Each structure stands twice: as structure tokens, then as C-alpha cells.
Image: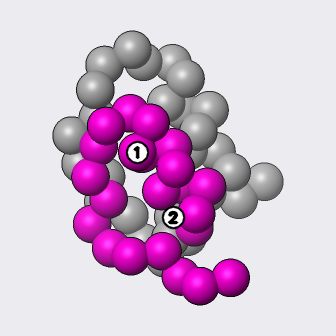
Amino acid sequence: MTDSEVLPNLFKHTSRRINEILGDGAYNTRQCYETVRIKQGFHSSHPKKE
């Protein structure tokens, strides 16, 4: 399992709004960006093209 696959499950454990996400390139996926968007947060970089 990769870091980007774990992120959505981590967010399921909180009902709080996530203000900002900082991470390395492992989190630079569309799945992570969608997860952050649902939590109304801000991701610090742009998703890589797949």
C-alpha cells in the first residue's frame, strides 16, 4: 500500500475540516487532491498528469 492510498483512510477518522496538506511527491495524485477537496482543505502543489 502506498502513502497516497492511505491518505483517504486517515481522513475518515476525523470529522474536522483540514486546512492545509503538505506532503512529498507521493501525495501528488488525483485521489489525494479529491480527498483534500472533500475535506475543504488546500493542497500545496498541483497534481501530476497521469
- Amino acid tagged 1: Arg
At a point 64% along the width and 45% down the height, the residue shown is: 6
Examine the rendering and report whether any part of residue 29 can be seen.
yes
At a point 59% along the width and 39% down the height, the residue shown is: 8
- Amino acid tagged 2: Tyr
Above or below, 31 against 46 in this view is above
Looking at the rendered structure, the number of numbered marks drawn on it comes to 2
Q: Secondary structure at mark 2?
A: helix
- The image quadrant where one finds the N terminus is bottom right
User: Mark 1: few, some, or many residues within 10 Å (few <14, many ≥20)?
Assistant: few
Q: Is residue 47 magenta?
A: yes
At a point 26% along the width and 52% down the height, the residue shown is: 42
Q: Could you say which quadrant of the image residue 3 lies in?
A: bottom right
At a point 32% along the width and 59% down the height, the residue shown is: 43
Examine the rendering and report whether any part of residue 3 can be seen.
no
Task: Tell me where residue 32 appears, x and y as whole percent.
Answer: 53, 54
Q: Is residue 34 left or right of residue 41?
A: right
The residue where tag 2 is placed is: 27
Q: Is residue 7 left or right of residue 42?
A: right
Pick out the residue farthest to the top: 15
Q: Could you say which quadrant of the image residue 50 lies in?
A: bottom right
Q: Is residue 1 left or right of residue 15?
A: right
Which numbered dot is residue 22?
A: none
Task: Tell me where residue 30 appears, x and y as whole percent.
Answer: 58, 63
Which numbered dot is residue 37?
A: 1
Question: What is the span of residues highlighted in magenta in the rendered image?
Answer: 29-50
Above or below, 49 against 6 in this view is below
User: Mark 2: few, some, or many residues within 10 Å (few <14, many ≥20)?
Assistant: many
Q: Is residue 10 magenta?
A: no
Between label 2 and label 1, give the one nearer the viewer.
Answer: 1
Pick out the residue farthest to the bottom: 49
